[in-house]
Image (cartoon, rainbow, N blue to C red):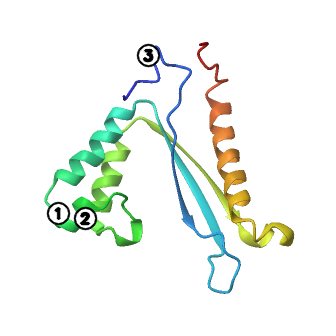
Amino acid sequence: MPYNRDESNSNFVDIYIDESGDLGFTQQSSEYFVMAALVPCNTLPIQRCFKKIRQQKMKKKMKQVPELKYNNTPPEMKRRIFRCLASCDLDIAYLILHKRQVPLHIRDKHQIIYNYLAASLVSKITACYGTFDPPST
């Protein structure tokens, strides 16, 4: 259920994470791996953005896609998404990995690299919003 961070659930932070690039180390691999996060103050406007965009006139195949891929998204839809997100109260965090800096001995451990990067990003975000005290059961 959507919530407003300013209300009673102040210990919770929603984080939407996406990445670009790949974690391969071949000649065909990307030079960088980017991980970005949206941290909304209220999740409802973001949910409404995507619902509204999907309901607008567009090709049937785009309405049925579970995840929008930037490279496959038409320019007009990208503009709508950016305009809608720009109107939301949210923070953006990101990290950029220059893959040449990854030590040789862990380059084949993609899941470890990914988990480390995701944990680093989430850790930085949660540090900005204070400590998390899980509810007692």
User: Does residue 83 lie above or below 68 as drawn?
Assistant: above
Other-residue count near label 2 (Cα within 10 Å), few / some / many at <14 / 14–19 / ≥20: some
| Residue 75 place in picture, x, y as percent | 30, 68
User: Does residue 81 lie above or below 60 as drawn?
Assistant: above
The residue that disc 1 covers is 58
| Residue 7 place in picture, x, y as percent | 44, 16
Q: Residue at x 49, y 35 (%)?
A: 14
- Circles 2 and 1, Cβ within 8 Å, touching? The answer is yes
Residue 100 relative to residue 88: left or right = right
Other-residue count near label 3 (Cα within 10 Å), few / some / many at <14 / 14–19 / ≥20: few
Name the kind of residue labelled 2 in the image: Met
Q: Residue at x 59, y 16 (%)?
A: 135
Farthest front residue in view = 137
Report how far apart the C-alphas of labels 1 and 3 lie in the structure. 36 Å
User: Does residue 56 lie above or below 1 as drawn?
Assistant: below
The residue that disc 3 covers is 7
The residue that disc 2 covers is 62
